[in-house]
Image (spheres, rainbow, N blue to C red):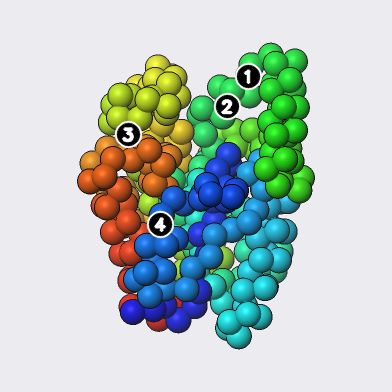
Amino acid sequence: MTSKYPILLAHGIVVKDFKYFKAFGRIEKTLKDAGYVVYTSNTDGFGTIDGNALQLKEQIQNILTLHNVDKVNIIAHSKGGLDARYMIERLDMQDSVASLTTICSPHRGSKFATKLYSLPKWLLKFVAFWLNFWYRIFGDKNPNSLEVLRQLKEIPASEYNNAVICKSVYSQSYSAIMKRSRDDFVLGIPLKIIQNVERNKQSDGIVSVESSKWGDYKGNCLDESVSHSQIIDFMAGKKKRQKIYDFYISICDDLTKRGF
């Protein structure tokens, strides 16, 4: 089975392909083994939404030329969904994208990012300097981690409600829930911070379920606890990892059935 159009996996912040490290773990290979034509975005790990959107546009145009097709399917994790939305809506790419599937993307922003941005500016600038320094070494063209943090802050409800969904692009979204902080010892810390501020809101440790909703909301990726990073095959247990692979295959299978 293969989809009509190639699949592009769009990563979020921090993670990116670098030598032997893969932004989506073995997900890309799993989809290729299932017969799909798959690429992973080569956008900056700490690039701004608008900057990464330009990089994403260039890569997609290359894919279209290479495969002699006029569209791609985008499956985006986290900020990758915001990069893709910006590209579609503001860079005249609506005719080049058949579908956009966002997974744990902070469409309404992130409470955790909002809390971080409230830290002393001297501390934020110090950390941002070194993040930008190292990510240039990792291959980023224009890292700007402090601006990225600002862009990921929570947005007013009015701004979200007035956002436009491109009707020519099939748009769907998924969320994830991390039920206990011990389920991911790294993201357990931000999960605790979010829970202390918003006790009744479920999240994957970084992005709330409500913020993940966009377009045709399909619910949670998995029925069980899964963190923001585990859903891209990072530090997930063997049994959970197979369920994650099956989830991505199910997305591609569904897009194929829809004629994408």
Question: On the image, numbered disc 2 is attached to which residue?
Answer: 114
Q: Assign a secondary structure to mark 4.
A: helix
CA distance separating discs 1 and 3: 24 Å
Residue 148, given in percent of the width and then of the height, sits at 67, 37
Residue 27, disc: 4
- Between residues 61 and 104, which one lies in front from this camera angle? 61
121 vs 164, left or right, is right
- Between residues 116 and 123, which one lies in front from this camera angle? 123
Amino acid type shown at disc 1: Ser
Q: Earlier in the sequence, mark 3 or mark 2?
A: 2
Q: Earlier in the sequence, mark 4 or mark 3?
A: 4
Amino acid type shown at disc 3: Met
CA distance separating discs 3 and 2: 19 Å
CA distance separating discs 2 and 1: 7 Å
17 vs 257, left or right, is right
Residue 118, disc: 1
Quadrant in the picture for residue 204: top left
Nearer the camera: disc 4 or disc 3: 4
CA distance separating discs 4 and 1: 35 Å
Residue 238, given in percent of the width and then of the height, sits at 26, 45
Q: Residues within 10 Å of mark 3 (few under 14, many from 20)?
A: many
Question: On the image, numbered disc 3 is attached to which residue?
Answer: 178
CA distance separating discs 4 and 2: 30 Å
Nearer the camera: disc 1 or disc 3: 3
